[in-house]
Amino acid sequence: MSTSIPLPFFFSDGVVHARIGHRPIQPSVGLLSAGATAKVSFRRQSNAHRHAAHVVSSESITPVKEVSSFEPSVWGDFFINYDPKPLQDVRILFETHNDTAKKMHLVDAVQRLGIDHLFQDEINNAISDIKESEFTSSSLHEVALHFRLLREHGIWVSPDAFKKFKGEDGRFINTIANEPRALLSLYNAAHLLVHDEPELEEAMSFARHHLESMRGGGRLKAPLDNQINRALHLPLPRTYKRVEMLHYMLEYGQEEGHIVVLLDLAKLEFNLLQHVHLKELKALSQWWKDLYGYVELSHVRDRAVESYLWSYAQFYEENLTVTRMILAKIIVFIVLMDDTYDDRATIEECRKLNKAIQRWDESAISLLPEYMKKLYRALLNYFRETEAQVEASDKYRVACMKKEQTGSDISLQRNRTLHFQNLSTYYLQEFEWMHQNYNPGFKERVALSTLSINVPVLCVTTTDGRGDAVTKESFELATGRTSAVIACAKIMRFMNDIAAFKSGRKNKGEATNTVECYMNEHKVTSEVALDKIGSMIESEWRTLNQVHCDHHQQFLVVQRLMKLAISVPFFYDNKKDAYTFSKYLHEIVGNLFVNPVPL
């Protein structure tokens, strides 16, 4: 997704600025008919020209206003009647694709092109039909696609589906070793394995071996070559969906049997959403600039845009603006608190800050040193404002971030507060270890740092914006110390620590991380420790895949938890920390939020 054109924006003081001299971003959607042109002026008219009202007595004739010479609207009733024909065309495709294989390819294309949110009912019905149909195929690509689609939707499929492609010795037959598209499908499908599925481990290893042998030498044609390279780096089920979507929009038109209307709609929808997201980024940048100026903490990271990216990974849909902004701002506050504990506060100041956060009241401000008071006040104010932003139907879920409580109803905002208070306690405990020169064992280190990585706080927000679609069971799955939450947290903790270890980054208030703990406890090299922790990360992915199948009835929330986990490799892949070192994200931010897709 590279481009030689300079981005029409830059970041300064936490704000998105337009680049002087750059052509303004033009709407990419064809709102006017082909060939139509219109000059739209937004210049302010002079008061005299706009209107002139006369002050007269009651006996005077009726005053006459001067008629303004404004140009008529170029939009007419466009937005009242706007329902793009491609939407209807795609709905017809869902209705008329009765063949299971065609239905699978349609669902896969709609999802990968990033327009699945427009067709949730159609996709759910199609998945139900695919599940119930007696599917038989001699195509490894189709069998693997069938397997992946159903497991992605939380429906259990046995790995026995791949037995037909094995010989009497139980190994995959050699004839499929020369089918790159089929091998790619098998490789991606196999990454949805759960614990104790050696058949899929074998499939993954087999596919990877042969795909790697095909790379280079011009053996693979576009777009398959690029798709294979990306998958070998990061398999499809673990990719940041909106970034993969940008790649696929460039590639889908080259695929045999592609459906033009899908691609047209995907481009149209992306450009429409891009305007929404860019507007939000501008608002968030200004909010951060104001907050940064108020709290006056020069030691904290300026990461408002990166925080939005993390929120966007879970909630990109147009109707989830409130949820998206709430999560982005909560991440900003987490970073403010994290950096204060790690880089500025003394042990006594950390204890005071935690005491104030546990009290969660304006009266606790007197406990704090001067430089913390504004941060604390801003934190309390934001959480109060957040509750007012959430719809009435969501309020029973909004209060959960202070201390975990069981056996009682608690609102989402209170839940958010409880988890935030817990996070402060975990930060303090880590600082206490460092202050006491205490070196915890690996298991003890993992137990605490899994909670201090802030995932439990973020998981609460996966229930935002879902209204009555979130049941009590879904809420408990996302807000408790469930296997799903812990798996997400461990993936983030381990990948974060690997990136920090490789970069040599260590903050003042940080004790040894999990990589160093493992090396010290087991007396091994960093290579051995990194390999072992990499295996642990793989184990947690399998746990998440299992949760997906075990909690099919809570699919909406499980899907959000999966997206949270999937966002982790986006920031910490290649053993780098792209959240802290945002230079790695500059091009991606431009492609997602600034550069429209050509229609």
Image (spheres, rainbow, N blue to C red):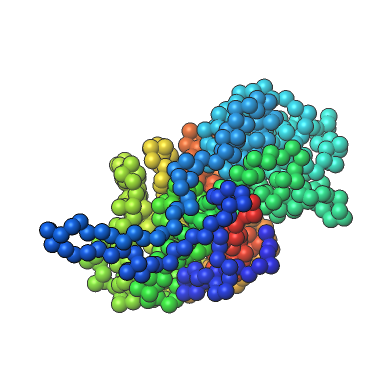
Q: Nearer the viewer, residue 84 or 396?
A: 84
Above or below 330: residue 398: above
Q: Nearer the viewer, residue 526 or 471?
A: 471
Q: Nearer the viewer, residue 427 or 177?
A: 177
User: How far from the left and from the top, in percent, is residue 407?
Assistant: 31, 40
Residue 87, by quadrant, is: top right
Please state, as top left, top right, bottom left or bottom right, where the N terminus lies in the image.
bottom right
Residue 309 appears in view: no
User: How far from the left and from the top, in percent, is residue 370?
Assistant: 30, 77
- The residue drawn where x is 52% and y is 63% is 306
- The residue drawn where x is 43% and y is 67% is 43
| Left or right of residue 265: residue 395 | left
User: How far from the left and from the top, in percent, is residue 355?
Assistant: 30, 65
Above or below 280: residue 374: below
| Left or right of residue 85: residue 410 | left
Q: Nearer the viewer, residue 193 or 26?
A: 26
Residue 394 appears in view: yes
Above or below 280: residue 254: above
Residue 169, by quadrant, is: top right
- The residue drawn where x is 73% and y is 33% is 142
